Amino acid sequence: MSVIPAGDRAAARKGQQSGKQQQGTGFVLLLVLLFVAAVVTALPDDDGEGGADCTARKVTSWTADEGTTGEFARYGNDAARDDDWSGGDGTHSVRLPDGRVLWLFSDTYLGRVNPPPNLAGQPHPWRDENTPLLRNSGVVMSAAGRLEQTLPAPLFPDPAAGQWRWPVAAKVEARTPGASERVVRVLLWTRETGTGPWIFGVPLATEVATLSLPDLRVESIARVSDQSAVADPARRVLYGTSTVDQDGYTYVFGGSDEQATARPTSAAHLARVPDGRLAEPAAWEYWDGTGWDTRDRQARPVLGDGGKKGVGSAFTVVRDGSTWVLLTMAAGTEGLTTVTSYWACSPSGPWYGPAKAFVPPLPDDSAARQDAAAYNPQAHPALSGRGGELVLSYDVNWLDPTPRVGQSHITRNVDLYRPRFVRLKLGPAD
């Protein structure tokens, strides 16, 4: 019921500390390396590199966004309807042309939330243990920032028995290149039931759904990268955890599922698609380590060494000026307790880091517990912009499977399965 892989769960308890970077010796060698690094950073290329004004960036400050967090609590706790959103994870968003914001969720609870019963040990709003859990949902926010509607759920139907779709990044683009009509493209992760380390599903494919505007009706779903023939599920790559538009392309970031096995971090991968062609499999190109290839099997990581450098199960990428910034849970170093960041002058890297960003605050009753976890940090440009701040969400879940008073923790306290928000400021790295 969450997107936390088994490797993340183990990392959350280990709390390993980062090792120190090795320092070079030799004054002349140091000068040469600094000169080469400066030249490489200053030279732009055709892959979206920043150029001379690309500089090292990191999170310099953050504050809890109680307003946005509270809006989801208000909407989720509203008992007026029995078929609307009350909790979910896998939080993504996209601003629509009319000013509304479409929020997309993976595993979702619908239905009524009960007020606190004023019983010892249960001071929070709660939902019935039999509340239905669906694989995905869509919630619409007004241009004024008020959540108003849950779309008929699940928004994206299961492709087959034992399989399901999790929505990830979305964008508004022309229906076809150059057309005036706009549609919403939603990237989907297709997974199927698994066992052992794949308790959260075996990765199968990346798909793209097309939604009409303004009614947000699902028109079609196209499979753009089928990974089912890759023998090792840990090496399968699903794309769409984050997208960034630059110079006529949509850069689509994805990741492997290596954390579900023995490795503490997963690898980040990169694809690109010309504007208006996100739903065309033939238009996709994949970074192969030196350039772009139309074959997804040739894809090579842009970040990740299987150890202390790498990404969590989901991550987000933004541009700050000419610098690319990646934010992820520091699963390989400090477990699911800390958001860390990398920066680069090109989406294909090299990526520098990690730098510690912040420790996400958890709901009140779990702040001191090791069994609560934050995961899936996601940037929301639709809400960002005030004073140069970046709005970032993160999901919250409970890792301890032991129920209490006949209920799981995320039904006893609905705050444990809802997104929370912070506002970040990015600035020069040390």
Image (cartoon, helix red, strand yellow):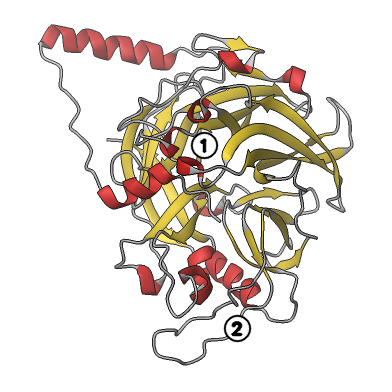
Label count reads 2
Residue 388 pos. (x, y %) = 50, 48
Residue type indicated by callout 1: Val
Q: Residue at x 45, y 80 (%)?
A: 405
Residue 383 pos. (x, y %) = 60, 54
Res 317 label: 1
Residue 97 pos. (x, y %) = 79, 48
Q: Residue at x 49, y 12 (%)?
A: 289
For label 1, the SS is strand
Q: Answer whether residue 151 is visible to the viewer in this image.
A: yes
Residue farthest to the bottom, as pictured:
118
Answer above or below: position of 45 versus 160.
Answer: above
Mark earlier in primary sequence (1, 2): 2
Q: Residue at x 36, y 28 (%)?
A: 306
Which residue is disc 2 drawn over? 114
In the picture, residue 63 is in which quadrant? bottom left
